[in-house]
Image (cartoon, rainbow, N blue to C red):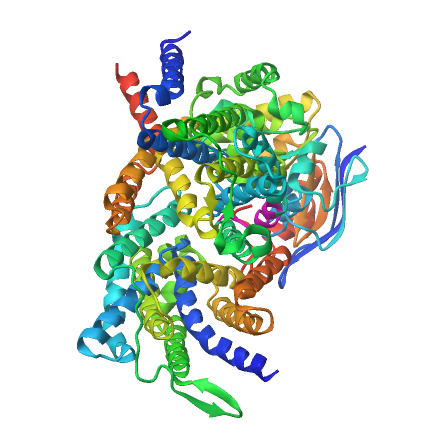
Amino acid sequence: MSLLEVEQLSKRFGGIVALDDCTLSVPEGSITGLIGPNGSGKTTLFNLVTGFIPRDGGEVRFKSKSIAGFGPDRIYGLGIGRTFQLARIFPRLTTLENMLVPVRRAGLRALLSHGQWGAEKARAMKMLASMDISEVAGTLGGALSYGQRKLLELAAVMMARPELVLLDEPGGGVNPALLERIAGHIQQLNRQGVTFLLVEHNLGFVMNLCHEVVVLHQGRAIAKGTPREVRENPAVLDAYLGA
Amino acid sequence: MSPTGLVRSASLILLAVVALAFPLLVSDPASTNIGVFTLMYVGLATSWNIMGGYTGYISLGHAGFFGFGCYALGLPLAHLHVGGGYAPFFLVPLAGLLTALFAIPVGWIALRTRAATFVIVTIAVMFMLQLAASNLIGLTGGTGGLRFPNPGWSGDVFNDPFYYAMLGLAVAAIAASWWIRRSKFGLGLLAIRDDEDKATAVGVPTRAFKLTAFVISAALVGMMGGVYGYYVTYVYPEFVIDPTIGISMVLMAFLGGLGTVTGPVLGALLLEPAQLWLAYHFGAIRLYLVFFAATFLLVILVLPRGIVPSLAVLLRRRLALT
Amino acid sequence: MSLVLQAAILGVLTGGVYALMASGLTLIFGVMRIINVGQGALVILGAYLSFVLFHNWHIDPFVGLLLTMPVMFLIGAVLEVAFIRPLKTDREALSVLVTYALALGIEGVLGYIFTANYRELSVWYDTQSFPLFGFRITLVYIFGFVLCLAILATLFLVLYRTAFGAAIRATMLNRTAAQLVGVDVERVSAMAFGIGVATAAAGGAVFGITNAFNPGSHYDLISRLLTIIVLGGLGSLRGAIIAALIMLVTTDVASVIISPEWSSFVFFVILVGVLIVRPQGLYGVRVRERI
């Protein structure tokens, strides 16, 4: 079953065509990689799917229901989370507070009461522990190292238990050891039932981690399949190395 | 309870006792007048902070809500022919509600814009209100002024009921600010301040949150405007919808520390008596404005985060060293 | 009808003055992303400087600009270095308060020196007018309008034809990128602020001739200027000019059609209307901070 379906999605910025009739789908329970040369439209796709920019044409469906045109907060509420290319956290809040910001259901009671705080805090600490960053729970986000921020960003997004998580370059700017840790966390969460769609330039990372890979080039999906299939696809090689 | 917790509770209790007993200890009208205005600004700065400090959206037009609340109390009083005494105090929540209702469409429009434009839109709204108040002579008395009923009590204790009314409102504002700060709603506001787009990405309903903070802040300020009107009896558009009131509450919140509960309180406790003293002694020569401005500039440049957060950092460092 | 047209013409002429003052304000915002709430006070300061030159040495305000504009430029640059540059955190919000404090300071000093009495620059030509197609065109407004055109044209020339102007525009578009290509953004900021304040001097001279003023006049003035640049779109010079014209024409026409008291209100209504439809103003850019 496809958790996320993108159908003939188009987007232009002035004269630049970022997405051109792009169609792809993300199977439920998978870790799907989205690769492609720079400028192929990967981040634009993310922004469109998560509601940050409006589309020019096409359709986006999550669990078979259209989510096109929804705002980012509503999309998160439906169960789609995302991380950013440059890890974004709230610098003036502590790590723990960062974990407590995400809102899945904005009921009045939930927002005003302090009663739930205990349960939520416990869950947050557990999540931080699983990412091995619980010792910085009281540190301000702005004081964290970049690697810690990346882990925090992922942990916080997971607080509302999203079913699909879009990761924008999870391996960007991190050392190999941390990269492995991140890969491990992704796999662990995937085993617990979370579907991932990740954009990544580190092809080794993608090939080892992903069940399926989609290749974007000039705004459209030109290939799809297992990592091995895609690696050997002449069209893909052409896109990366071609004129 | 931890030592800091004990210190905090003890100082709170002490503060409460002093605040309650003040008019009894220092009963001359000049001092209680200072008390009334200081408490008013404690409330104003705290209420303003709920929006400006927590969300980072600076409203320089809050004097508009202050004035709106003033008229929102004064006009019903005039039309219902309410006499003096304590009755008007019971209508103050009504003024707050009316101000809240007014703030909803205003906030909806103003919050469509980003932070920089928002500031200016709030200023524009304030001037629109001032114009409306001046020109709708049939309704508000225009520049001729609106008259509040005569309280009926007089002499040395005239100020006292107003002192307690302002104290009550200040406590309400502080309580609201504290409650919000500790809640998920408050965390969401702070997240909006840090990175609004990221906040929406994690599900924070930013528009609804901003509007709610705006309306709460406006309603509280409106109620203080109402009590102010009753206190001064005669209300004129340019004096109640006065940019100086609006900027003062902002200054105080900044001085004390945005985004904290105690910051605005401290800022008001420091600045308002100073402002009154300066105006009294130097009001005739306009230089008191210069003193005020200079103080503020100095503080901004030396303690850009405000007193409370800067002290907190200092304390943290001291404690870390010991 | 002719009254309305007369009012419209007046609006265009006085709009020029406001366009000049507003352009300085929007330039400052564009380059430094700060709102100079003290611009009104600086205009009044300019008016008082012109007043001093006129009253004591009979120097015509327009001629006096040769002196007041450079002086105000320097004042602006100094203010920027002393009070704006040190702001590191929360720049946008703090700059609003700092510039407001500066405005208060200026108001206080002016009040101390000149008292709260209203002053005016009563030049010999301030009531002279000549007829044109049945309408009376007041001479001084023409002078003011021409001055504004001249200064604005110079501003555009500098911005679009000189290297320095390119540096300013680069800083406006992307501060970091400008730094990366070697633009001294700190110096550009100081100079942009200086230019903004110099335009206030020019505005002040014309304002002083056509209005009675005292130290407290800056409140009304800054509220108009701020709403003009919001309508035009923060940071857009073209927007500031057009918005100024719209504002002055509509308020002057509304003054005739409805009443003088409600004329400003009409403008605010227009502003609100535009903001509902286009929150970024007429020529502003919808800024999505980072995605």
Image x and y of residue B215, in percent: 58, 38
Does the stretch in magenta take in A139?
no
Image x and y of residue B150, in percent: 49, 37
Marker count (numbered)? 0
Image check: C182 left or right of C250?
left
Image x and y of residue C207, in percent: 37, 71
- Residue at 38% over, 45% down: C94
Which residue appears farthest toward the left when viewing the image? Answer: C57
Quadrant of the image occupied by residue B196 = top right
Whether residue B228 is situated above or below residue C198 in the rendered picture? above
Image check: C274 left or right of A21?
left
Quadrant of the image occupied by residue C52 = bottom left
Does the stretch in magenta take in B113?
yes
- Residue at 36% over, 15% down: B14
| Residue A38 visible in the snapshot | no
Seen from the viewer's position, the closer of residues B291 and B195 is B291
| Majority SS type along the magenta span | helix
The quadrant of the rendering that contains the C terminus of chain B is: top left
Image check: B283 left or right of A206?
left
Which residue appears farthest toward the top when viewing the image? Answer: B1
Seen from the viewer's position, the closer of residues B255 and C172 is B255
Whether residue A164 is situated above or below residue B287 in the rendered picture? above
- Residue at 34% over, 70% down: C163
Q: Magenta segment, which residues?
A: B106-115
| Residue A111 visible in the snapshot | yes
Seen from the viewer's position, the closer of residues C50 and C242 is C50
The quadrant of the rendering that contains the N terminus of chain B is: top left
Image x and y of residue C100, in percent: 36, 51
Whether residue C26 is situated above or below residue C130 in the rendered picture? above
Quadrant of the image occupied by residue A168 = top right
